[in-house]
Amino acid sequence: MNRHRSIWPLIKLNRLLIKRKFDIVHVQSKELGLVLLTYFIRSKFVYTIHDTGVALKYINCPYDLRISISECVREDVKIRTGIDSIAISNGIKVTDFRCKIREMTNKASVFKIIQLSRIALPKKGQHILIEALSILKKRGITNILCTFIGEGDSSGLESLVSKYGLSNVLFLGARDQSYIQEHLNEYDLLVQPSMFEGFGITVTEGMAVKIPVLVSNIEGPMEIINKGEYGYFFEVGNAEDCAIQIEKIMSSDNVQLVNSAYKRVCQIYNIETTAKRYIEEYKKII
């Protein structure tokens, strides 16, 4: 929230919440809890904690229920603050995604990598992936096309691409969810090289279209792939290890892996499962 913006929207929001008397007010923005007049709003307040490292002043607002988006976020909150929360993973509508149709391909064909997240350095770690592509290029592995999709200023990454003399990198900018759902299955690998991450919704999307996923070995994404059972991982911040894993994936038969990963998404990260968990917790506090 920008402190220089008008406070009138906040006043109107508080008036609305006081007047309408909702059973549940579910807060997604960490800053919003600081400006809600919870004493006058006769509702139960729920706050979703979206990442590790969220400051105590946000978590310690007078909420009736705190929900963490993963076990690692729940543990982080408990260790740092002593405050309990319930872990409910983010979910996706699996049926909205098109699964990849696997065909016999020539090893000389182009291997398509997708990196799907907002451009936010260093957190999202896109620079690590570009460095890994440079390492692969030096090894003579050039049959790769890497596409970055996500909002944000890509000029720094484009400069890095130019520095390494890479010609196999595309920046498509922001794309809406329908575009992702339609085109994600056209890729051969999804890479999430984040330096820190509480969850990693795009990892579940890659699993939902049955393409291999490669993540940095930080808690959130590693929880999704169950420490390597349903995807690949590399040492966080290590471009060399990232390159090694990409080369390994390019030469591997991943059919069994992606099928198992798909089943995991359907069972655990389906939006229907997530919604049921939320409703169960809502009922406990009403």
Image (spheres, helix red, strand yellow):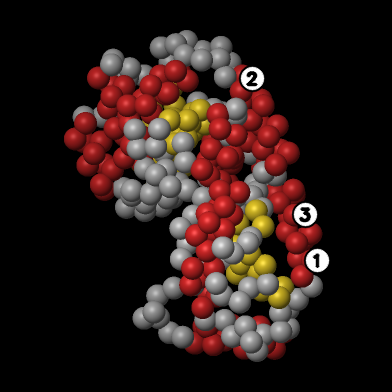
- Residue visible at 33% across and 48% down in the picture: 122
Mark 1 belongs to which amino acid?
Lys
Q: Earlier in the sequence, mark 3 or mark 2?
A: 2
Q: Quadrant of residue 181?
A: top right
- Which numbered dot is residue 256? 2
Residue hosting label 3: 276
- Residue visible at 58% across and 40% down in the picture: 223
**Which numbered disc, 1 or 2, marks the residue closer to the eye?**
1
Q: Residue 94 placed where, x, y %?
A: 68, 41
How far apart are labels 3 and 2 at the CA level?
29 Å
Residue hosting label 1: 283
Quadrant into which the C terminus falls: bottom right
Q: Are marks 1 and 3 in contact (CB under 8 Å)?
A: no
> Is residue 153 left or right of 191 when viewed as pictured?
left
Q: Earlier in the sequence, mark 1 or mark 2?
A: 2
Q: Residue 270 placed where, x, y %?
A: 70, 44
- Residue visible at 40% across and 32% down in the picture: 235
Is the residue 118 above or below the residue 21 in the image?
A: above
Quadrant into which the N terminus falls: bottom left
- 10 Å crowding of disc 3: few (<14), some (14-19), many (20+): few
How far apart are labels 1 and 3 at the CA level?
11 Å
